Image (tube, helix red, strand yellow):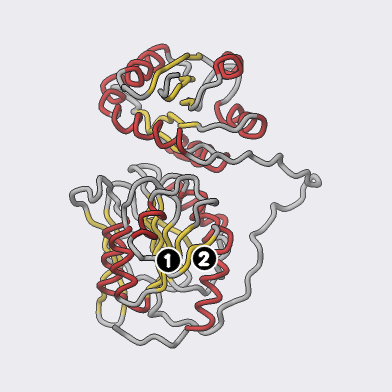
Amino acid sequence: MSTKTRVVVVDDSALVRGLLAEIIDRQPDMTCIGAAADPLVAREMIRNLNPDVITLDVEMPRMDGIDFLSRLMRLRPMPVVMVSTLTERGADVTLKALELGAIDFVAKPKIGVADGLRQLGADITDKIRTAAKARVHRLAAPAATAPGAPPAKPVTMASLGRLSTEKIIFIGASTGGTEATREVLVNLPADCPAVMITQHMPPGFTKSYAARLNSLCRIRVAEAQDGERVLPGHAYIAPGGFHLSVERSGANYIARVQDGEPVNRHKPSVEVLFDSAARVVGRNALGVMLTGMGGDGARAMRTMRDAGSYNLVQDEQSCVVFGMPREAINQGAASEVLPLTQIAPKLVEWLRQHVGVATRV
């Protein structure tokens, strides 16, 4: 029996279908078993061929890729890698796809598609491999709401009251992390300590991601800017293509957003952020490692713990991919291992008990 990952490609461009099939078939561990020009053809192909993974375009005839994804994840959930054009609208739609349950995405170039996709070949096939191993959850049917009813708000969580501006929460995430990070942030109160986040994301997507989170959360969320002061009640996301770290300037913490070589093959890298947390913030830091492939940040999270930080790691059952959390646990970096939905409440509980306890480092 073949152990190859079986992939169906869905894209309205014959050129893209051919290129993706060629890229996939060059790999010894995967094969393209079909290519569909629109979701209706794809639906029959999926039913007849039962693929392990599909790649899915967004803008297609007869049915939008997002509509198709929503139906697929409700009726027949399976690993999906989105292939989205790198535009502002493409970024917004891709984030919607991740919300609906897509495992990951590839940013398809607007021009020079053929050369661009060939250059992205390793990234595309890596994401297909990850998707094939990912934990896929069925999308719940949307709840009925009365016409004109306001959207549901995040669960209310009591204020922390008096804050220590010394404390900072540091979050690292990769595959599956956009929604995992959202789950944590929407359940933090407006007066929580500053949050600094490295989510593996390419340039062009983090601005839309930050804006989406900002619309959902009680704290303010934005892309980090180099040299800005790190303030309570704010979350700072590493811009795609740049490393994020923290430094001290007198009595204040400031964000550093810098170019540089990839670390652990990533830019931004969780390792860079967590190393700075250990070095600069020490026992006033709280570390959170969420779902993701690989081991980026695991060693540095152990360094954080050795420096006195309190670290939470997402458990295997609630992860899309249990790579980065597993490595953090293996490194001895975890103070506690928890389901995703318990991470924000645990942070708040810990802060209530420890606000004002730690001193400057």
Looking at the rendered image, the quarter that the N terminus falls into is: top left
The residue depicted at 47 percent of the width and 83 percent of the height is 355
Is 259 on the left or on the right of 202, as rendered? left
Which numbered disc covers residue 219? Answer: 2
Q: Quadrant of residue 193 in the image? A: bottom left
Q: Amino acid at mark 2?
A: Ile
* Mark 1 surroundings: few (<14), some (14-19) or many (≥20) residues within 10 A: many
Do labels 2 and 1 touch, CB within 8 Å?
yes
In the rendered view, tell whether residue 343 sits above or below residue 120: below
Per the image, the residue denoted by label 1 is 195
Looking at the rendered image, the quarter that the C terminus falls into is: bottom left
In front of the other: 37 or 331: 331
**Measured from the top left, where is residue 303 in percent x and y?**
28, 68
**Measured from the top left, where is residue 62 in percent x and y?**
60, 17
Element type at mark 2: loop
Q: Amino acid at mark 1?
A: Val
- Between the C-alphas of marks 2 and 1, the distance is 9 Å
Sequence-earlier tag: 2 or 1:
1
In the rendered view, tell whether residue 340 sits above or below residue 355: above
**Measured from the top left, where is residue 334 in percent x and y?**
41, 66
Element type at mark 1: strand
The residue depicted at 41 percent of the width and 16 percent of the height is 17
In front of the other: 297 or 151: 297
